[in-house]
Amino acid sequence: MWRTSGVSETLSEMGNAMRGVVAFIPSERCQRFLVGDLKEMPLDRTLDLSSRQLRRLPIAACVFDELVKLYLSDNNLSSLPAELQGLKKLQLLALDFNCFEKLPAAVCRLPQLSILYLGNNRLYSLPRELSDLKELNTLWLETNCFTVFPAVVCELPNLKTLHLGYNQIQSLPTELSRLEELRTVWLAGNQLAEFPPVLLEMHFLAVIDVDRNKIRRFPCLSHLQGLKLVIYDHNPCVNAPKVAEGVRRVGRWADSADEEKEDEGSKAASETTAEVVEAHTEEEHNI
């Protein structure tokens, strides 16, 4: 059993190494090795080119004008061809785990785009043209290089879910309150020194995650009628946020007996992670 496993791992490593070498070679034959023959429209209108060691997107992938979902996660992409904007029916685009320092202009010209994954890149700003994505409802920007909240996000009227965790953001703009459709805000792992005042005005928020920041004192959140979950753990806080009855809290001084605090906190965090994964899957399934 061990030898079989070892051989499989070795073959897998050799395959990855080969793809890595081929990725540097722009010939058509090498591209076919990486992505296969892109000649026919996938029946489910989904094209998955994740984890192919791609350094450029083959133009052939942009001819399927009926495509609804395009996965390019876990590659070495830093740009995209202008031909991508021809995918006018594209609703989901996954560009996470790549090397983007700037969002390619073609992405902002996809009128039906509703879910955009940009996590784990090198982004530090977003273009004004992102506001043209009027149908965008889910935006993942976690683990990038943002030091300032990207203001253009406040111009996405249908945004429901915003993931901005693990950046270097210190505050949120008051304009965020314009997003009346926004329901979940994930801000874990940033540099927030205080609970963002603008969130106190957003009565429709259901989930607020400010885990792993630098917040020392939490205001009362009991007036947020739509709130269902607040995650505030791993802050140097001296108090827990007060919430309305039925709202779940994850953090210090949550409502449980002393001997149950650690177990309850771990359980709640696990349940929350499961909910995020489930919601993530449901968003894609609903397209």
Image: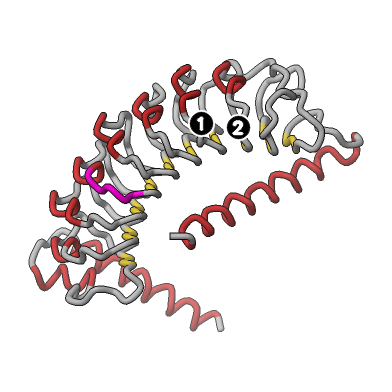
Callout count = 2
Answer whether residue 74 is visible to the viewer in this image.
Answer: no
Q: Quadrant of the N terminus?
A: bottom right
Dot 1 falls on a residue whose secondary structure is loop
Q: Amino acid at mark 2?
A: Phe
Q: Which mark sits nearer the N-terminus, 2 or 1?
A: 1
Q: Residue at x 50, y 36 (%)?
A: 181
Q: Residue at x 23, y 55 (%)?
A: 88
Front-lying residue, 95 or 219: 219
Q: Is residue 164 above or below residue 46?
A: above
Q: Is residue 152 above or below residue 82?
A: above
Front-lying residue, 221 or 4: 221
Which numbered tag is attached to residue 202?
none
Dot 2 falls on a residue whose secondary structure is loop
Q: Are marks 2 and 1 in contact (CB under 8 Å)?
A: yes
User: Image quarter for residue 18?
Assistant: bottom left
Q: Which residue is mark 2?
A: 204
Left or right: 279, with 142 as reference point: right
Q: Residue at x 72, y 36 (%)?
A: 250
Left or right: 156, with 233 as reference point: left
User: Image quarter for residue 86?
Assistant: bottom left
The span from disc 2 to disc 1 (Cα, nearest Å) is 7 Å
Q: Which residue is mark 1?
A: 180
Magenta stretch, residue numbers: 109-113
Q: Position of residue 268 (x, y in %)?
A: 74, 45
User: Image quarter for residue 27?
Assistant: bottom left
Q: Amino acid at mark 1?
A: Glu
Front-lying residue, 103 or 203: 203
Most common SS among magenta residues? loop
Q: Position of residue 193 (x, y in %)?
A: 57, 16
Residue 218 in the magenta stretch? The answer is no
Q: Position of residue 69 (x, y in %)?
A: 34, 61
